[in-house]
């Protein structure tokens, strides 16, 4: 239940950033959700096989930490994309705007 609520807020955050960057928000929401689940499974697997944990609470916690890390990676990739600059702003500047 906690993951579903977190994924809703994550999708909203990714949607805002994607609109700002001028890219397709649905694609980036899918990337974020898929990376959430992939990194969660990786975190659980690392906790099980490397640290030999069988406690369900520790497995869930490590999965949640890795899943949030996956979201942060997708968010960083999206944030590093250039902003969408409309041609209206460029065309609106005239020679008079450049004089002191």
Image (cartoon, rainbow, N blue to C red):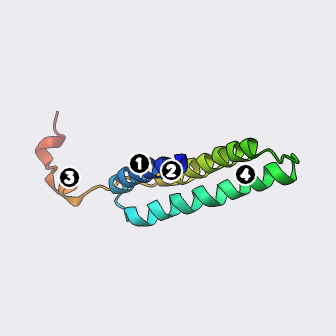
Give the mark nearer the N terminus: 1 vs 2: 1
Residue under the image location 11 percent in, 43 percent down: 96
Estimate the spatial distance between the alpha carbons at disc 1 and disc 2, rounded to whole Å: 9 Å
The disc label shown at residue 50, or none: none
Residue linked to disc 3: 89
Q: Indicate which disc residue 13 carries.
A: 1
Q: Nearer the viewer, mark 2 or mark 4?
A: 4
Residue 11 image-quadrant placement:
bottom left
Q: Please, what secondary structure does the residue beneath circle 1 have?
A: helix
N-term mark: 1 or 4: 1
Q: Secondary structure at mark 2?
A: helix
Badge 1 density bin: few <14, some 14–19, many ≥20, Cα 10 Å: few
Callout 2–callout 4 Cβ contact below 8 Å: no
Residue 60: x and y in percent read 69, 46
**Helix, strand or loop status at disc 3:** helix
In the image, taking residue 61 as reference, residue 24 lies left or right, namely left
Per the rendering, the mark at residue 43 is: 4
Return the residue nearer the eye: 50 or 23: 50
User: Does label 3 or label 4 sit earlier along the sequence?
Assistant: 4
- Say above or below: 99 vs 4: above
């Amino acid at each position: 239940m906690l993951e579903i609520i977190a994924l809703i807020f994550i999708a909203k955050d990714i949607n805002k950033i994607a609109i700002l960057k001028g890219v397709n928000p649905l694609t980036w929401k899918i990337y974020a959700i898929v990376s959430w689940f992939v990194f969660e499974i990786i975190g659980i697997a690392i906790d099980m096989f490397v640290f030999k944990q069988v406690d369900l609470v520790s497995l869930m916690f490590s999965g949640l930490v890795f899943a949030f890390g996956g979201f942060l990676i997708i968010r960083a990739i999206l944030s590093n994309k250039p902003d969408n600059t409309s041609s209206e702003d460029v065309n609106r500047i005239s020679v008079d705007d450049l004089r002191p």
